[in-house]
Image (cartoon, coloured by chain):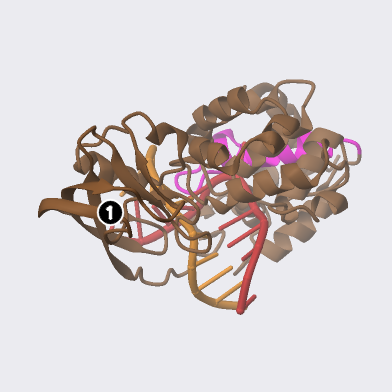
Chain colours: A brown, B orange, C red
Amino acid sequence: MNSTLADRLLPWFATARRDLPWRKEPRDPYRVWVSEVMLQQTRVEVVVPYYRRFLRRFPTLRALAAAPLDDVLALWSGLGYYARARNLHRAARACGGALPSTSAELRALPGFGPYTAAAVASLAFGEDVALVDGNVTRVLARAFAIPGDAKAMAWKIARDLLPAGRAGQFNEALMELGAMICTPRAPDCPHCPIRPICRGKDDPASFPAARKRPVRPLLEWRALALTRGDGAVLLARRPAEALFGGLWDLPVERPEGIRILGRVSSLGVVEQTLTHREVRVTLQTARASGTPKSPDVRWVVPGGIVALGVSSLARKSLRRAGVST
DNA sequence: AAGCCGGGGTG
DNA sequence: CACCCAGGCTT
């Protein structure tokens, strides 16, 4: 008997499956969606606490659609890739109370690419549709010894292997295998359920082929921590299309309507390494007063920052300036 | 097809 | 320090 990959994978998954908050049965499409978006390029352990907070504040799609974008970004603060939050919010408002139930319709909503549309459709609506993420690419690249860039071939193989009527389980099992056994480094081949049919088991490090990374350019920014007598700090909203778009941050210069009192002093340098950028912020501080002219500039009192979207880098600068976040 | 978009855990 | 994570959007 020539047993298939699905035949080996599904029994293993039934016993090894992690208990994650978005796996509660019956699957709620909204919850599946939120988890899938948060999990884009983001590890499970990082997502879990964000997911719990998000669902507590926005328990339903309607609650999310009714909320202001700033509230959504506030709960996304620190998670990164903030376009995900903006698209999630846009899609919630666009889909009129309920998610569409097919991958083709989902694909038309903002933030739904090939992966997320297939994930929500198969996991929440039972559609027989394959998916490929970083885990699946790695698992299939090894299992079938795919040379070079394995992504496109992985999609073809995933479709070929998909067991009818069990797409959701199969997709989740494939990703779980990639996360728990067939890991990027030091995969646990001896305990792998598909080891007998894996072509890459003797050389897992060769698959998928390594991509070369471009060098990280250095961004040199300035930031001004202007504080008021009552402890408030002045924040400015970043342009939507910029890095950290739509989030609140320390201003680069003195905004219109603001007077600086006394002397400007240095707070040194704050740094943050991103995937494609190295950011170095030269930080200064001063006492100030006045009323900002732009609505995108605000005095934020201590404790008020929690209600705004703020990047991890901005949080570092605020901490350096002695502002509690 | 390639570049851009965060942040952090891990070897 | 390099690598990569339940990717999508833009050009």
Q: Which residue is mark 1?
A: A258
Element type where label 1 sits in the image: strand
- Residue A124 percent location from the top left of the image: 80, 34
Q: Quadrant of residue A59?
A: top right
* Label 1 neighbour load within 10 Å: few <14, some 14-19, many 20+: some
Judging depth in this view, the residue of A23 and A238 nearest the camera is: A238
Q: Which subunit holds the residue at mark 1?
A: A
**Image location (x, y in percent) of residue A317:** 26, 47
Question: What's under tag 1, amino acid-wise?
Answer: Ile
Question: Which range is magenta?
Answer: A165-194
Q: Is residue A173 at least partly visible in the picture? A: no
Residue A97 is at least partly visible in this image = yes
Above or below, A76 relative to A280: above
Q: Is residue A226 above or below residue A61?
A: below
Identify the residue at image location x=36%, y=52%: A292
Q: Is residue A92 left or right of residue A41?
A: right
- Residue A277, given in percent of the width and then of the height, sits at 37, 64
Q: Residue at x 48, y 60 (%)?
A: A239
Place of residue A259 in the rendered image (x, y in percent of width and height, measured from the top left): 22, 54
Locate the N terminus of chain A by quadrant: top right
Q: Does residue A275 appear to the left or right of A50 in the view shown?
A: left
Q: Is residue A180 magenta?
A: yes
- Residue at (70, 30) in percent of width and height: A63
Using the image, determine if residue A44 lies above or below residue A273.
above
Q: Residue at x 71, y 34 (%)?
A: A32
The part of the image, by quadrant, that contains residue A33 is top right
Residue A154: say if magenta. no
A44 left or right, relative to A219? right
